[in-house]
Amino acid sequence: MRVHVDPERCQGHNRCYAIAPDLFEVDDLGFATEVGNGTVPTELEAQARLAVANCPEYAIVISEDA
Amino acid sequence: MSEPRPDVADFATDFDHTDPKWVTDPFPIWDDLRERCPVAHTERYGGAWLPVTHEAVAAVAYDTEHFTSRSVIMSELRPDDTMLPAPIGIAPPITSDPPFHAMARRMLLPAFGPKKVAEYEAFTRDLCRELLDATTGASTLDAAVDYAQHIPVRVIVKMLGFPQEDADIFREFIHLVIEGVNVSAEERQAQFEASDIDVYLDARIQEHLDEPRDDLTTFLLEAELDGERLHPDHVRGTMILLMIAGIDTTWSAIGAALWHLAQNPEDRRRLASEPALMDTAVEEFLRAYAPVTMARMVAEDFEFEGCPFTKGDWVLLPFPAANRDPDAFPEADEVILDREVNRHAAFGLGIHRCLGSNLARMELRVALEEWIARYPDFELTDPDAVTWSAGQVRGPRSIPVHVS
């Protein structure tokens, strides 16, 4: 599983960073990006899904095939 | 004083967010409107629209072409194209439109990012403890007046580098701006002119120009927009924005959460015994009791959800109603402290997402943690004694409680 933050949609709500700090980081402006290439370790898959489900801007996409 | 407005008979055709029914309990009004018409209308305030579904509220928030943020507080004082320097507006960036908005906002974002906000957590915690210490020995106190209302204003005053004892000046000004919408245009203009807030802020700005400090005021004075320092008028406008946006709002959120807990002993016990619940609980309080309704003005004639929106009409943007839409949130009217999926819009949606959301969340969490640590058990002395603010920021202004 991989996660990716769409920079066009992210408005810096920081929900993903609060829910899954190992998967997302925020810059000084508060905009989020996925950590590394976005690969989600198996044990963090539930966190990744929660981060997606709590983004008010629908800015995070998840792909299962990585 | 101007004549009081007549009470609303039908909110679908004559809504008014300052009507006593809305102020006391708006939720049944929104539920009813969602069933009957997703966009309500009123001739009050010179003509205004009210979307109430999550979908319609989001659509307005995202559409910065058809809706301008030139004025975000709906009142009888309706700015036209010539009154304010659009696209900047009186309090950038909340009153700014693209493309200026992005520059003005980008400049402010570093001061409110999660890491910067964390620097103020210890101050906030000490402040909460100090406020609670002052209530020692009391068997009844007012959770809004004695506690919640002091927290955000004193944190903003701290961030700006102003004397803590000046917090009252800010509280009074905010009351005027946000809760004084229900008066005539002339009266409102006169109130602003009588307020000395500009004089006060100009004096603080001059002090900081003479002697730069490590605070938000100096940050604003040294910030550059398009390669140039901000004009002091812009800095003052931004300070006014921080007050309007940061004080009543968070005070309302803290108060509403305490009001809820005062009436729900099981939620009190859960929060006291399961501190890890606080993160989802904070989000749920923000969803269920979102304080802030914004406003837009229609920028050009067009049809929205079958309604003839006309240039200059107001559009009220009730994020609290969006948060109670059952199509967006299962059991929308239940407060579920461990609600795991919570895409609430308490801080707005799109480019105007609340700049201070990290600060507000921190203050709400710390205020609740400290209150519960001191008073795990408390209840309303009289539910009818609770009063709510009228206007676009809704929260309890008096919450008398018994503590033990």
Image: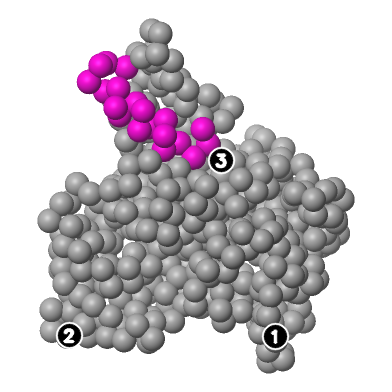
Q: What chain is tagged by disc 2?
A: B
Q: Residue B285: x percent and y percent?
A: 37, 57
Mark 1 sits on what residue? B5
Magenta-highlighted residues: A40-58
Look at discs 1 and 2 and give the one toward the viewer. 1
Tell me whether marks 1 and 2 sit on the same chain. yes
Q: How is the image coloured?
A: one colour
Residue identifier under label 3: B107
Q: Quadrant of residue B72?
A: bottom right
Q: As rendered, which of B37 and B144 lies closer to the eye?
A: B37
Q: Quadrant of the N terminus of chain B?
A: bottom right
* Residue annotated with mark 2: B138
Residue B404: image x %, image y %?
13, 79
- Dominant secondary structure, magenta: helix
* Depth order, front residue of B37/B342: B37
Instruction: Say whether mark 3 and mark 1 are on the same chain.
Output: yes
